[in-house]
Amino acid sequence: MNGGALGVVLLGVFLFAATGGVQAAPQPDAMTEEEAARLGEEFGIIVGAVDEEIQQELKLQQAQGVAVFEVIGNSRADFAGIKVRSVIKEIDKQEIRNMTEFGMAIKKAMKGCNFTVGTYEAADPGDPVGWGVNFHFVGCKRD
């Protein structure tokens, strides 16, 4: 390697070190759990990630999905029949495993008029079958 090439390499190493190494570009589609929760409220539900405690309480096979803690009256979620203690597993055929996926999917879905939400819900008390899958049709926003 000649002196000029070595100087270019050293300059590159210096610039790399001076800028803190590789900088990740900001993700335009990044979604925080807080933003996902806010979008859930806009839709009409108070939600949270399914953690191990919720998994055990609801007797789920995996700690995946988004748990519905509250349904806000007269909201799109309320009109669609989404229930407290259900677990959102799908929005418009997109699997929901965590709050980030929920946030991105509900944000996209609410831009349109009609979409579906797939949930796992507890059956009626005394029903030997237990949990069931339910699909909720969400229509246009009502004024």
Image: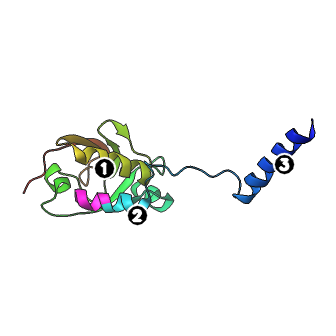
Q: Is residue 110 left or right of residue 21?
A: left
Verify whether residue 41 appears in magenta: yes
Provide residue 141's location: percent of width, then percent of height. 13, 51
Q: Residue furthest front?
A: 4
Provide residue 72's location: percent of width, then percent of height. 20, 64
Which residue is label 1 attached to? 107
What's the CA distance linking mark 1 and mark 3?
46 Å
Which residue is label 2 attached to? 34
Query: Could you say which is closer to the camera, residue 6 or residue 72?
Result: 6
Mark 1 or mark 2, earlier in chain:
2
Q: Residue furthest left?
A: 143
Query: Could you say which is closer to the camera, residue 119 or residue 117?
Result: 117
Residue located 12% across and 61% down the image: 74
- Give SS at disc 2: helix
Q: Quadrant of residue 116?
A: top left
Magenta segment? 39-46
Verify whether residue 110 appears in magenta: no
Q: Is residue 14 above or below residue 134?
A: below
Instruction: Find out whether the residues at labels 1 and 3 contact each other: C-beta distance under 8 Å.
Output: no
Crowd class of label 1 (few under 14; some 14 to 19; many from 20; radius 10 Å): some
Give the residue type that dot 1 points to: Lys
Q: Main secondary structure of the magenta part?
A: helix
Crowd class of label 3 (few under 14; some 14 to 19; many from 20; radius 10 Å): few
